[in-house]
């Protein structure tokens, strides 16, 4: 009986994760709407009006409990969010979290047309072939390997890394931009 229940539990978890994973990874389209009076607001928004009241009541309840017990609010909040996910993980709570956000509007990055075209493509399609990074040595083995690789059509470099007298690998820790494999990331 236990083996059957274990198998049933595994099948249930697999199917639940399969069908609900997209809900955990992506925000619904209505989360980005600016105003509540927009035509695109979902029909269920009237049902969510009670959630806003529940969220305000939940937050005020946390403050009251914190004041009564003299326990810091940052200790009580995660416990309350765990015990009441229907209030603190609701669509209304997520909209409020997105509106107050932890972002700076003046710090919005600028993107080129090429960046926008490649934004949702797999990096394997859009990135250049990586450079082979060799460590420079005093005997000239890295220079020889670089010549052989260049004749074979493989880009390589020995800048920013070296082998010291003790045979240990060192690389440029202070100036990371001179490392040939360094790539400035995009802020999306």
Image: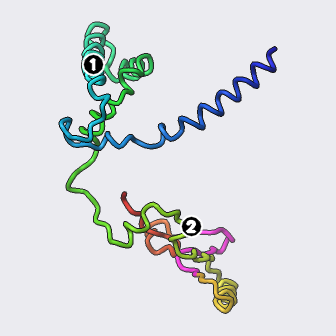
Q: Which residues are magenta?
A: 157-171
What label does residue 124 carry, if any? 2
Q: CA distance from mark 2 to mark 1?
A: 46 Å
- Residue at image location 25% in from the left, 23% down from the top: 49
Disc nearest the viewer among 2 and 1: 1
- Residue at image location 24% in from the left, 50% down from the top: 104
In the rendered image of this protein, does residue 53 appear above or below residue 132? above
Q: Disc count in the image? A: 2
Quarter containing the N terminus: top right
Q: Secondary structure at mark 1?
A: helix
Position of residue 120 in the picture relative to residue 140 (left or right)? left
Residue 108's x, y, as percent? 26, 58
- Residue at image location 63% in from the left, 77% down from the top: 134
Position of residue 188 in the picture relative to residue 183 (left or right)? left
Residue 170 within the magenta-colored segment of the rendering: yes
Q: Which of the marked residues, 2 or 1, is nearer the chain's N terminus?
A: 1
Residue 123 within the magenta-colored segment of the rendering: no
- Is 140 in front, or is 88? 88
Q: Say few, some or many: other residues with alpha carbon within 10 Å of mark 1 (under 14 / 14 to 19 / 20 or more).
A: few
What label does residue 50 carry, if any? 1
């Amino acid at each position: 009986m236990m083996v059957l229940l274990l198998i049933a539990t595994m099948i249930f978890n697999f199917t639940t994760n399969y069908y609900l994973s997209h809900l955990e990874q992506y925000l619904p389209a209505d989360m980005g709407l600016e105003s509540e009076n927009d035509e695109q607001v979902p029909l269920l928004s009237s049902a969510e009006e009670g959630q806003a009241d529940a969220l305000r009541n939940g937050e005020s309840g946390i403050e009251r409990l914190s004041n009564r017990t003299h326990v810091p609010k940052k200790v009580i909040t995660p416990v309350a969010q765990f015990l009441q996910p229907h209030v603190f993980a609701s669509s209304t709570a997520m909209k409020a979290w997105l509106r107050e956000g932890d972002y700076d509007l003046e710090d919005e990055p600028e993107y080129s047309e090429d960046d926008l075209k490649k934004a949702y493509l797999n990096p394997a399609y859009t990135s250049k072939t990586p450079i082979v990074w060799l460590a420079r040595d005093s005997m000239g083995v890295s220079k020889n390997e670089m010549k052989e690789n260049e004749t074979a059509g493989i880009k390589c470099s020995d800048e920013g890394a070296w082998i010291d007298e003790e045979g240990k690998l060192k690389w440029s820790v202070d100036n990371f931009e001179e490392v040939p494999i360094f790539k400035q990331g995009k802020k999306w």
